[in-house]
Amino acid sequence: MSTLTKLKLANASRKPIEETPEERMRNRMVAHLTEQLEMATALAEGRPYKATRTVREKGEDGTTVTVEREKRLRPWYWHDLTGKWFIELRYANTVLALGKDQNAIEIGTKDKLVQTIQTIIDAVKAGELDAAMKAALAARKKPGKSA
């Protein structure tokens, strides 16, 4: 018992970390933007990018095996015929309205793509796109069925 007297004892309980809906929304958007950032970085470096996800499958002998599978990702950025690059932000499977009749950000050249995505991540963390994300989420929700 003399060993335990050297330690500082406390009466504490473990509580789960509670996120507000806004924080959950921002964290989800930042995670998706981080994937886009990794894809854009690979594009700038001229190397292929493949995202993977962990899946549990049944093996040949019937046991459950953890396997990595390729994840299908679609880039949110593109370029037009003149060479200008654009990025559209998506949340809840809809394109975010960033302003009145504006749904994309004009980047200009491909070399500014990574820097622009990083700026967007900072804006999401600061909460600047909360209203647009809430509007996209509200537009996606279907009205309840009346009995």
Image (spheres, rainbow, N blue to C red):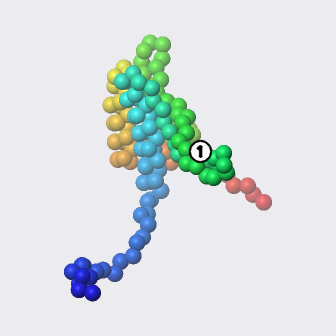
Total number of numbered discs in the rendering: 1
Image quadrant containing the C terminus: bottom right
**Residue nearest the observer in this picture, 45 or 95:** 45
110 to 101, vertically: above or below: above
Residue 125, x across and y down, in percent: 36, 47
**Residue nearest the observer in this picture, 53 or 112:** 53
Picture residue at 60% right of the left edge, 45% below the top: 140
Location of mark 1 (residue): 139
Q: Residue at the right extreme?
A: 147
Is residue 38 visible in the rendered image? The answer is yes
Picture residue at 47% right of the left edge, 47% below the top: 28
Q: Amino acid at mark 1?
A: Ala
Picture residue at 63% right of the left edge, 47% below the top: 59
Mark 1 residue crowding within 10 angstroms, few (<14) / some (14–19) / many (20+): few
Image quadrant containing the N terminus: bottom left
Picture residue at 37% right of the left edge, 37% below the top: 120
